[in-house]
Image (cartoon, rainbow, N blue to C red):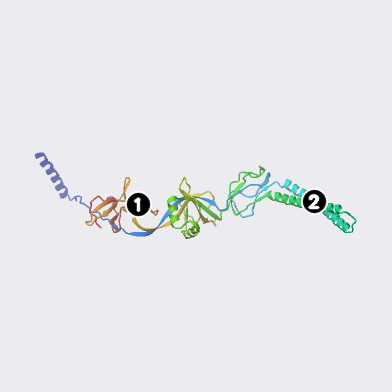
Amino acid sequence: MKKKSIKWSLVLSTMLGLASCGIDMPKEVKTSFETMTVEKQDITVPIKFSAKMKGQTDVTIMPQVSGQLMKICVNEGQQVSKGTTLFIIDQRNAQLELEAAQANLEAALASENSAKLEFESNKNLFEKNIVSRYMLDNSENSYKRAQASVSQARASVNRAKVNLGFCTITSPVAGVIGEIPVRAGDQVQQGMKLTMVSGNLMMDAEFSLPESLVEAMVSAGAKGSDKEKHLAEMPDVIFVMKNGTEYQHKGRISTLTGMVNATTGTLAVKATFPNPESQLFSGIQGTVVIPTERHDVIVIPQTAVVKLQSKQQVYKVQPDSTATAIDVTTEDIGNGQDVIVSSGLNVGDKIVTIGANNLQEGQQVLF
């Protein structure tokens, strides 16, 4: 007992000494907090999906004839109009084939003319009973064969003209030239890929919707004859580049496939974006953001939520102004400021929004 009394006397003498030196003793400081009363509200929640861009009219350019590639008229990445000349294949063989076909056509026309004269002559003689029916029929058949030969020769000329036209390859759409894997002088074959033209005036962002959202859309009327109406009523969507930049033009959901993928449980979707400045290219990846209306939900600031390992808690202010920790489940809104509370809170509850991390169970809340 003597040791304890000596110990406390030393403590008291030290405290008195500090006080006599003008040093203030630490005092208990009560912290003020900000609170809010929980209520339900309507809110727009941005839902994000990874997407890949593709031109609506991406076209693979392949030659229709074989031959030596004489000239490449465009560069990779070049913007071209519909009808722009892209490649020129050696035309000499095709030109010779056309000239031969035209010569055959002229010969067939001459034969046709001779057969026609003979048939008309025999027809007049037959009417005068000078020649027999056999001679008339024979000359008529010869005239018909000559007419058929003319038709065949004319078709050969047209085919040769088409083949000659195939030697000059033009762009079927307006767009941007992709990679060109060939060089002038290469021997190209029919069906060989020369490049791709991405028709980028309108671009499709391709992504997948999860089955849960698909069911929600179906229940909202996105089926049968109501599907197009539902698409028309959907809000504009946003495309965000991988670097976080938001594309300046908004798009629209344009297509929904009619079947859910059995493996992934998703529905393939396309959102169409205008591309007047050619800022979007086929193959780029980003995020499609769809604003979704949520009705009658509890929204609280993120600062009100205290995370403890796998738990999320909110401090509820009791009638006696003490704080009680309540477990909650939340859903991120995506604005970096608020969350939706799925369970744990009721309308009318008062919670701490600022200073929750400094609270302890049962602590008095001043506000």
The CA distance from mark 1 to mark 2 is: 86 Å
On the rendered image, what quadrant is the N terminus found in? Answer: top left
Q: Which mark is residue 330?
A: 1
The circle on residue 219 is none
The residue located at (70%, 49%) in the rendering is 163
Q: Amino acid at mark 1?
A: Thr
Q: Is residue 299 left or right of residue 166?
A: left
What residue lies at 44% left-to-right and 50% top-to-bottom? 211
Depth order, front residue of 82/270 = 270
Q: Position of residue 349 (x, y in %)?
A: 28, 57
The label on residue 145 is 2
Mark 1 / mark 2, whichever is N-terminal: 2
Q: Residue furthest left?
A: 2
Badge nearest the viewer, 1 or 2: 2
Q: Residue drawn at (45%, 47%), measured in percent from left and top?
A: 265
Q: Residue furthest right?
A: 130
Residue 242: tell me if it is visible: no
